[in-house]
Image (cartoon, rainbow, N blue to C red):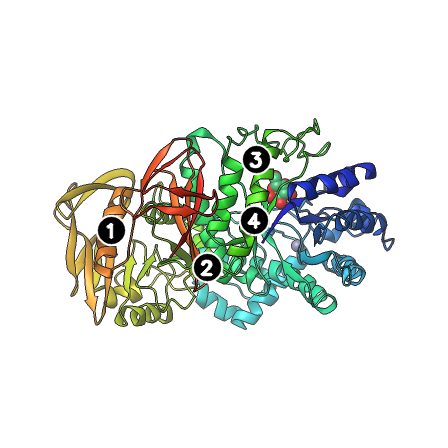
Amino acid sequence: MRMGMDYYPEHWDRSMWEEDAKLMQDTGVSLIRVAEFAWSRLEPTEGNYDFEWLDDAIDTFARHGIKVVIGTPTCTPPNWLVKKYPDVLPIDAQLHPHYPGVRGHRCFNSPSMRHYSFLIVEKLALHYKDHSAVIGWQIDNEFGLHECNCEHCNTKFRDWLKDKYSSVENINAAWGNVVWSGEYSEWSEITTPLGGNRAKNPSYLLDYKRFETDSVVEFQQLQLDILKKHCPNHFVTHNIWSYPMSLDYYKLGEKLDFVSLDYYPSTSPEKDVTSGYSGALTLDLTRGIKRQNFWIMETISGPPGCWMPMWRTPYPGFIRAYSWQCIARGADTIVHFRWRSAPSGGEQFWHGLIDHSNVPGRRYEEYRGLCDEVNRLAPLLEGTQVKGKVAILHSHDQYNAFQGQLQSDGMDYFENIKTLHRAFTKLGIMTDVLSENEDLTGYKLIVAPSLFLLDTALASKFDEYVKNGATLVVLPRTGVKNPNNVCWIQPLPGPLSESAGVTVAEYDPIGKDKNSINWNNKSYSCSQWCDILTPQGAEPVARYEDDFYAGKIAATVHTVDKGKVYYLGTFPEESFYSDFFKDVADTLGLTYIPNLPEGVQVSIRSNGEKQYMFLLNLSRKQQTIQLEQSYYSVLNNKDIAQELNMNPYDVEIVELL
Ligand code: GLA
Ligand code: ZN
């Protein structure tokens, strides 16, 4: 477990490196990430590699006990490369190249891009494979999907489709191209989406997204293979951007040693409490990519800006508390972005830890204290993991399918996951947020938000979990389509109807209008969607209170062997989830913390022998928590009372016996 800094030696005069390295060492920093945008310095002209400056920088930091992660610079192809080999540039929907200036100007399928990336990564790998300070690699920077319509992408897309469907006739059948005369008679008629108007065939658009992910994964794999070949003792990771995301992070993460996350919680006072909860979800999602601990490769150390008017400066305690939140949810190393604010370039005002003044200030002092704490507790926390008690399912495919076809005004797949996850976080119940393709054996409670695309294979997997004792919670828009994004011709929830013991007689996409449901003699408002249910063996548990379907069934429960399936036919307000999950937790014997104050989060890291409970007040308010007993805080080396008062952004870590 290390504390690290993103450092850009190429932004500073060499005379500053030594001073920076010394101050970092004094601060407790033992790692830097370098070079991920430095291609024009590493290869100033074609084939002329210059690593002397990077050697010097790495050696300077190494002399201060600081290890190094090298970022491969392929997110920023230099000007000579794009000028000489224009196929490097992605082509937008108007068939214009995306010119350099703002990074990310590379087509993942461009032969020149792949060739020159291969060369520079190989040179770097061979050069640094035995350097004692270099411990690992970050490939590229924050991959994402950026539609490219170049000839190479067109050819590769057709090849991808040939692999999947063999013939255009099969595509016509699988996508239902008969509608609007969309049938293809030969391969050359198929193109990239040129902007991908949402009214285009959804099956085509979804397959294109999958193709885009595969292109990124292939591009990454090219680098991964070189790095693994020459540097077998180094780890290889990638720093993902946040959620929601079209790029399938599960596929991206498959071959990496671990995943890293760039984490920028909002500093806005209005988002004071919500950003902690969305952050908790982001961290749980990241841990779920490979079902293992992860790194934070960038996180906030000053007011962000440039891409938007600057955000508020992190409130006292914010930098520290949010770093602990990352560790509390499975991060093993925290790298802050960045040591000092950039003197020039597009991100001058995305502030680093130290301002342009170059005078370490309040944020620096807070960070220094954090380094002391993390370094002191690292031996205790090393090897500990986070294990959730509840599984919430997430899928980039479902997200992309919903993004392509908005279901009702305000219905948002990812926002709904946030609400569900927040309800658990507020109850102090840790969740693992996992791909629907994972093995979920062992979870007593599985929450499956809107399995829009659902085939019988996936449905029977859920049947099995339920028969073996799991409780499954299903939400509206489940079982609507097959994985090709074509509607099932059968009552909803399609392949899950039997285990849910219910069918949808009619639905009302009410969007931002409101209805309400009555559950356990209490009324809860609901919106977005209303399924009117007909039980087929299930018991009604909630009814609508309004509109022409007042009194009709809104939610059911079906007992199947040892387990149960709840079908919730609408999206109720958050307090419903809170009451409902408490009720389910009681039945399943899952413990929760009633009355956890807003903004206070609790989680546990354990290694089988020892358990450490993290208590975080991620809010600007003083909060009081009722604990089961008094504890000793290993973080602050003091006893903490059963009735614990926490100041804004306070953190406590206790060892559970
Ligand atoms: C991302 C990038 C960084 C930097 C930060 C701040 O996370 O990876 O290079 O641009 O955002 O904007
Ligand atoms: Zn392309």
Classify the position of the C terminus by image quarter: bottom left
Q: Is mark 4 within 8 Å of ligand 1?
A: no
Of badges 2 and 3, nearer the viewer stands: 3
Q: Residue at x 71, y 52 (%)?
A: 68
Name the spot of residue 480 as percent of width and height, x first: 33, 59
* Mark found first going from the N terminus, 2 or 1: 2
What amino acid type should be assigned to the residue bearing mark 2? Answer: Ser
Please name whichever residue, 259 or 334, is drawn nearer the observer in this view of the structure.
334
Q: CB of mark 4 within 8 Å of CB of mark 1?
A: no
Disc 2/disc 3 C-alpha distance (Å): 51 Å
Residue highlighted by disc 2: 203
Q: Which mark is residue 376?
A: 4
Q: Please determine whether, in this image, residue 406 is positioned above or below residue 308.
A: below
- What SS does tag 1 mark? helix
**Which quadrant of the figure shows ligand 2?**
bottom right
What amino acid type should be assigned to the residue bearing mark 3? Answer: Glu
Disc 4/disc 1 C-alpha distance (Å): 37 Å
Q: Is residue 463 left or right of residue 373?
A: left
What amino acid type should be assigned to the residue bearing mark 1? Answer: Lys
Q: Is residue 261 left or right of residue 39?
A: left
* Mark found first going from the N terminus, 4 or 2: 2
Residue highlighted by disc 3: 366
* Mark found first going from the N terminus, 3 or 1: 3
Residue highlighted by disc 1: 582
Density class for disc 1 (Cα within 10 Å; few <14, some 14-19, many ≥20) is many
Name the spot of residue 111 as percent of width and height, x first: 73, 60
